[in-house]
Image (cartoon, rainbow, N blue to C red):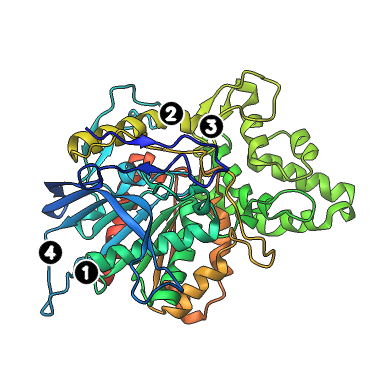
Amino acid sequence: MTDYKWESQDRATAVSENAIRDDNAQERLAPAVTRHVLHAENGDLQYTAVAGYLDLTEENIGGSLAQEPSVKARVFITQYVGDADTDDHGNNSRPVIFVFNGGPGTSSAWLHLGLFGPRIVDVLQSDGVTACPPPYHLRENPQSPLACADVVVIDAISTGYSRVVPGEDANQYHHADVDVEAMTNIIRLWITRNERWNSPLYIAGESYGVLRGSRVAARLAVRYGVYLSGLVLISSPITFGRMGFGPGSFLGAHAFFPTYAAVAHYHGNHPELSMKEVLSEAEEFADTKLLWALNQGHRLDTSTRATIVARYADLTGLSRDVVEQANLSVTPQQFRTELLRSRGVVLGEYDARFTGWNEDQLSRVPEADFTDQAVRGAFAAGINSYLRQDLEYKNDLNYELDTTRVRPWRTPSDFHRNPFHVIGALAEAMRVNRSLRVLYQVGHYDLCTPFYGAVSDVALLPIPDELRGNITVHEFDSGHMIYLDEESRIIQSRQIRDFILLRK
């Protein structure tokens, strides 16, 4: 049994409480290696699973010539490698897709057991919104992208089992720039140690992983000459400017509006219209009258304002009083509490099909995210039991599904560059590596990151016209974690498979 000891010190000290005390490295940090068969839709695949640590090393710049690099952290990775297909030069021709979630502070268990892994956890009952009770069931995933590509699941430092080594401060990695450099180096080290430089390479990132992944794709190309074949972006705009509300910042009001209309339609608004019709009307209104009215501010005359307020209320299912009080800028928190107030329930954030209850029935602030409440137990039990029982990996550390240890997440002090605005990074990655393709997948019921923000961001990418065909956006009638919806998960998986096979 693994018997890690801990340094328990204040976060401000040089040695983080997250550091692993490693008195017996060879025995305690050995990876678990197991053999399996995936019964995929296109036939059986034999593969090797390896769960364990990758030593994140950094070159000692300015030190002695050829000095050994220093181990800074041990990054937990679960990799699935199919039986090799080699070309005439001995290169493994199977693509590799690197997978991570976001947060910051979120492990990759969600994508691992929700979409990419060879086994997935049953989270919801047949109605799609009621949580399965414990004990939870793991089942084979015949749609896993493993059928066509090796899958490498990475838990960012301080998430999952990933920790810094003794003597290192974990806080150094809780920084947008350092996080990107670390993830870039992790991928470089993996392809180097596994001799996969000449395999087709992909990255898949969800939520903050979209921002991280866009910057990592650019950094890999510019710093190391690692040109990806593709980038899968799931559930987030590529600039957090799309999240802004308030005076002088109304892109959030624009980006979230079609989501409000979609959610209202799901909960019974405009039953005579299809989702496609609702979204068409909502997007046109958002792009024209709403944006214009928000920019007009107090120049808007009373009669015109009343007309726009009425149309806003009609499309979103909110009362005109609420829209007026919010000054045409209803925030996601307000929408979550107001849409179904008459029914006494509050909407989920990550997926607004889920509902819950506020203790303070008068509040306009949701007291919890009911999506998270519904699915957390299944993913926590699923990842811990799967790693120990199926993959035979033993570790008594807490698997940090989500952690607050990364707070505060620091950003660069240079105000000219916003780490949450990565349109420039994604555009650079596409301009430098002109063969890079991007698959963008977003959900209509996501009240955390608005799908229409991603649609708008893609349209604003500063890339030449001949590269615009390299990026495709797919929308789903699902939430932030698209794969929670079983029908959407299957379609999402097949899109990823086709995306990879197109290049292969």
Separation of residues labelled 1 and 2 (CA atoms): 41 Å
Compare marks 1 and 2 and give the one earlier in the sequence. 1
Give the crowd class for mark 1: few <14, some 14-19, many >=20 residues within 10 Å: few
Closer to the eye: label 1 or 4: 1
The image quadrant that residue 149 belongs to is bottom left
Separation of residues labelled 1 and 4 (CA atoms): 12 Å
Separation of residues labelled 4 and 3 (CA atoms): 43 Å
Separation of residues labelled 3 and 2 (CA atoms): 9 Å
Compare marks 1 and 4 and give the one earlier in the sequence. 4
- Type of amino acid under label 2: Ala
Residue appearing at x 34%, y 28% in the figure: 125
Vertically, is 282 above or below 216?
Answer: above
Separation of residues labelled 3 and 1 (CA atoms): 43 Å
Instruction: Please state, as top left, top right, bottom left or bottom right, where the C terminus lies in the image.
Output: bottom left
The residue closer to the viewer here, 277 or 90, is: 90
Q: Is residue 203 left or right of residue 258?
A: left
Check disc 1 and report the residue beneath it: 195
Closer to the eye: label 1 or 2: 1
Check disc 2 and report the residue beneath it: 374
**Residue 45 image offset from top left, x and y in percent:** 12, 53
The image quadrant that residue 84 belongs to is bottom left
Compare marks 3 and 1 and give the one earlier in the sequence. 1
Residue appearing at x 46%, y 70% in the figure: 219
Instruction: Please state, as top left, top right, bottom left or bottom right, where the N terminus lies in the image.
Output: top left
Residue 200 visible (yes or no): yes
Closer to the eye: label 4 or 3: 4
- Type of amino acid under label 4: Ala
Check disc 4 and report the residue beneath it: 84
